[in-house]
Image (tube, rainbow, N blue to C red):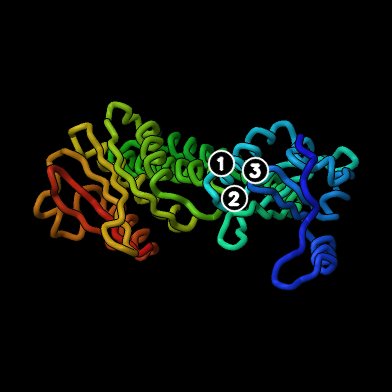
Amino acid sequence: MDQSQEPVGEPQDGMGEREFRELADNAPVMIWRSRTDKLCDWFNKPWQEFVDRTPEQLFGYGWAEDVHPDDFERCVAIYNDAFDAREAFTMPYRLRRRDGVYRWFLDNGAPFFRNGEFAGYFGSCIDITEQRDLEEHQRLLLAELNHRVKNNLQLIISFLQLSKNRASGEEAKTLLQGAISRIHGVGAVQNELHKYTSGVVDLAEYLPNLARSVLTIERGEDHILTTEAQSVKVSFQTASNLGLIVNELVINAIKHGRVNRIALTVRRPEPGVAEICIADQGPGFSEDELTSSTPRGSAKGRELVDALAHACNATVIRRNLNGAQVCLRFPC
């Protein structure tokens, strides 16, 4: 560890060293500075007091000795990579307090320049322990909620399956099976959305995973799913509605496609517009199905797709293109 660093020099822009130190040492954040060789040569008073170490003990890479062992390699790697690229960085890590307790900090660092020449990095750390604890608590609550919802849905499915087994007419059996499939779809959507905690869902990841789950649930494992997806980020509510639509369309493709190949496309055909398409390589829609109010599949399925699409401000396009294709275009 190099402890030969010079003390902080005279600050720029006319601020005296005394005023600068007074400002830095009374700031409500922990501040550090490094030289052009990556070695730190200054820490403000809050940092020194937090770890109860002298500046000389922190100089060089001495500061890293207080980083949690599980975060150490990642922390140093991010710091070195950003430094070599002369880029700003943000990284969370745990830092050991003077009493031995580790607290979570968010470290933001950025390069600074003197007379146009790279002079090193300045950085600041804020304590985010309470925020991390709250996020973990919310994650556990969501996991418990997801578990209960899945159990309740499974109970409903069991009741519907029992009713289907007891039904005598084919029409009743078909309606009950449709209800079972849609509730399975709700469960699949719930399970996929549970993976997102930021309030934003990327359709490029979410919809392909959901479609695979639907194929598994509907025993369509012999179907080949091909996907082509660009990143499209939407809200939870929009993702939920689009997921239910994809569930309905994939089930229809399994039932009516005849050829066991289903294609899912998520793309941005133009700025501010997203498009989702589900296509199969079956016989496609008949002319009557394309022009009538009840194309292939049940009228209830058509109504469900159109209602959910309306909630997303989406336009539904049904057409034949080497098979049946249903596309949704919506603003994003």
Dot in front, 3 or 2: 3
- In the image, what residue occupies the spot 65% across and 52% down? 121
Q: CA distance from mark 1 to mark 3?
A: 13 Å
Q: Secondary structure at mark 3?
A: loop
Question: What percent of the width, then of the height, locates residue 80?
Answer: 60, 40
The local secondary structure at tag 1 comes to helix
The answer to which of marks 3 and 2 sits earlier in the sequence is: 3
Kindly identify which numbered label has been placed on residue 37. 3
Residue at left 62%, top 46%? 142
Query: Which residue, as the protein is rendered here, is positioned at the far left?
Result: 287
Q: Residue at x 31, y 63 (%)?
A: 271
Residue behind mark 1: 81
Name the residue tied to disc 2: 89
Give the residue drawn at x 32%, y 58%: 274
Type of amino acid at the residue the image marks with label 1: Asp
Q: Which comes before the other along the chain, label 1 or label 3?
A: 3
The amino acid pointed to by label 3 is Asp
Q: Are marks 2 and 1 in contact (CB under 8 Å)?
A: yes
Q: Please, what secondary structure does the residue beneath circle 2 have?
A: strand
Q: Is residue 86 visible?
A: yes
Q: Nearer the viewer, mark 1 or mark 3?
A: 3
Above or below: residue 66 compared with residue 119: above
| Amino acid type shown at disc 2 | Phe
Q: Find residue 222 and report its horizontal and vertical position in percent.
A: 28, 26
Q: Residues within 10 Å of mark 2 (few under 14, many from 20)?
A: some
Q: Position of residue 49 (x, y in %)?
A: 88, 50
Which one is nearer the viewer's eye here, 267 or 142? 267
Which quarter of the picture shows residue 185?
Answer: top left
Q: Is residue 255 left or right of residue 104?
A: left
